[in-house]
Each structure stands twice: as structure tokens, then as C-alpha cells.
Amino acid sequence: MLALHVHHGLSVHADEWLRHCEATCLRWSRRGAALAFAALRVEGAPRSGDSVEAWARKARYAALRSLALERGVDLVLLGHHRRDQAETFLLQALRGGGVAGLAAMPKIARSESLTWARPWLTTPREAIEAYARHHRLRWIDDDSNGDARFARNRLRLHVWPALIDAFADAEAALAAAADRAADAATLLADVGAADAASIAGEDGLDLARWRALSPPRRRQSLVEWLRRELATAPPASLVARLLLETADDGHRRWPAFDGELRSYRGRVSYEKSSTRFDPAPSQIDLSRPGVHALAAWHGAFHVDAVERGGIAATEAARVVVRARAPGDRFQAGARRPQRSLKLQYQARGVAPPLRRGPVVCREDGSIVFVAGLGIDARAVAAEGVRQVAIAWLPDSVVHGSRGGDR
């Protein structure tokens, strides 16, 4: 068993608290308990104007995660009790939170390789204190709990006593309401995720199908789609802005975390800044049917043997893969004019994130294939020649054949 302690550096008593926890664990271990102790001092401090409570909470969880993972721990037990849950429900309600906020704190939450659990979440604080007194355990009360500058403290000092005086079972009732809100939040998330899966694909969110949903499902599917794309819960301000500014199919952009959301031709897609890359040119053999992965391009070529409409297998055996270059032109058909890649992308309605794929050229530099557009008409092999068709599959783990931009 491992006891974890976070030194926030916010109180003049922080060093004293650290020594108390360390000494307590050492005393118990000497009495035979299989117990170790680990602590981490938080670096930095909240910036001017930041919420001290929010900063300390974020720093605390980051420190606990670091301590646990460094020591091979995969389960962290937290000490929140029933009153903490009731207070969180009230604070979220006063802030105008939705069902996800009113759900307050989950009993169990899994995040990557860690599980966070709150075994006392249905236990009254009085029961915990009675246990501690019975076993003569010594504890320290944080003196900052009396500071009314903090929202939770104002609730505890001024609202909670009056509330309990008027409604003796308020704590249990509010904690139960949080449980029901958690069930509702799970149901909403499931419906939203199912909707998002049905109206969104690799090329983004289909706005026409999205607008056909009822307003509540529209909002929830957007939240779940953003959660999947951004890999984190989207801020309410971003959700509100998208709901307001996607009433038509105009071309717009919205900054989002480490990337950008784009609305283009009836679809909204997300592009991470880190995925904008320009790998060096490299030679590749695309004459053999199958999947040819290119790690540097975050995707793969899928090659099929065909009787017509492909490129000669002998040419495909020695081609160069490179990024787009100024002056690149593509011919979409035998009797159609050569046009810049930008104009061809626009004509085909290729979304901006899908324009990052590679260009395939012969060794003399003439274009054979462009991701998102397909095989250049000038490179199509004559009938009777052994030939292959090429498709580009971005960000995919491919098993078998897929269609696409052949």
C-alpha cells in the first residue's frame, strides 16, 4: 500500500502537514503495516486572476498521477465523502451546470492507465470522524477552510448550516440527486455518441444530417463528436459558438486547443497543428497489391491489381512520394484541362484536412497520383498493360481493401 501526499505550497503550514503525514505513515509501518509514503511538491503558483481552487485541484491531480505512475500504482483512492458530493452538486447548480456537472464526482473514473475511486462518497463525514476518534487517529484541519473568499467555503460557512437546519436530510437528498444526474449524463453521452457516429466520418461532421436532429440531440452529438476529436471535454463556450455559427454552410474556422476546426462545404472537421507536416521526398515501390504504410505521412497506400484505369506496374515500382509543391497541376480526365491542386480540391469538394496527403511522382517529377484526387489522367496506362490502382488511406490501420481516391 502506498500513501500519497501533495505539497501545494499555498499554506504556511504546508511543511508541517507533510511532516505529519510522513511521520504517521512511518509509525504505522513500524507497527507492521505494509505501507510506504510518497510526496510531491507542486511547482509554480496560480497566476493573477486565476482561481486558486481550480489551480490547486488541477495541480493536485497531476501530482497524484505522477506519483502513482512512477511507482507502478494503477488504483488511487480519494477521500471525498457524502457532504463533498452534496456541496459539489449545489455549486454546479449555482453555476448553471448541465447534467454532467450536476452528476458531481463519480465513484469510479478510469483515465488511461489509472483508476480513480472514491470509496467514501456515500459515507457521511460524521461517520468518518467517529471512526478516527474511536481508533485515536490524529488529523489536521486545513485552516484555509475558514476563508470565505473561496466559493466552497462560503457555501459551508453561510449556506450549509441554514440548509441543514431547514432540511435535515439535505445532504443525503442532494447526493442522491447527483447519482440520478450521473445516470442521466451517461444516457445522454451514449445517445450523443451514437448520433455522432452516424453523422460523422473521417472527413468530418455532416452538417445537413446534424441539423436534422432535434436541438437537444444536436447539441449532445456535437459535444460527443468534439470530445472524440479533441480527446478532451470541449469548453461550453466552443460548443455554444459552433451551435450559433453553423446555421449555414459558410467556410469558417475556430481555434480549438492545439488545432483548428474548419467548416467547409457542409462539413466540420478538426485539424491538429501537430499533424501539419512536410516529410522529405522518398522513393517507394507501389507495384505490389496490398497495404503500404507510410509512418511519416500518418497513413497508407492501398494498391489493387486492375485491368484498366490504373498506372503501369513497371512505373509504380519506382515512384517518389512528396508533399505538395507550388506549381503542381493535376488533370482529372483525358479531355479535361490541367488545373492547380487548389482548384481541383475545390472542384471535388475535398475538405482542407484531407488535402495534406502525399503526391506521387515519377522520377522525372511528373505527377502520377494525388491523395484526395486520384490518378492523374496523363499517367493512366494503356489497356493490356499490367497495371495497379492506388488509394490513399489517411490515419488508418487498414485490414483489407477500401475505396477512396483511386
Image (tube, rainbow, N blue to C red):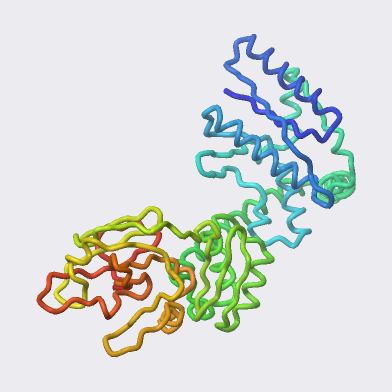
Q: Is residue 173 left or right of residue 383?
A: right
Q: Quadrant of residue 20?
A: top right
Q: Is residue 301 above or below residue 203?
A: above
Relative side of 158 to 361, left or right: right
Q: How many marks?
A: 0
Quadrant of the snapshot with the N terminus: top right
Q: Is residue 133 above or below residue 347?
A: above
Residue 355 visible somewhere in the drawing: yes
Quadrant housing the C terminus:
bottom left
Residue 394: x, y in percent? 39, 63
Instruction: Specify whether residue 83 is in view.
Output: no
Residues 330 and 154: in front is: 330
* Residue 235 image point, x, y percent: 66, 61
| Between 402 and 165, the one nearer to me in the picture | 402
Left or right of 38? Residue 263 is left
Side of 248 where 143 appears, left or right:
right
Identity of the residue drawn at 63% across and 13% down: 29
x and y, in percent, of residue 143 in the image: 87, 33
Q: Residue at x 67, y 64 (%)?
A: 236
**Along the line of sight, the residue nearer the viewer: 6 or 358:** 358
Q: Residue at x 67, y 62 (%)?
A: 98
Residue 13, image quadrant? top right
Residue farthest front in this picture:
364
On the image, the x and y values in percent for residue 314 come to 17, 65
* 288 or 173, nearer to the observer: 288
Residue farthest to the left, as pictured: 384
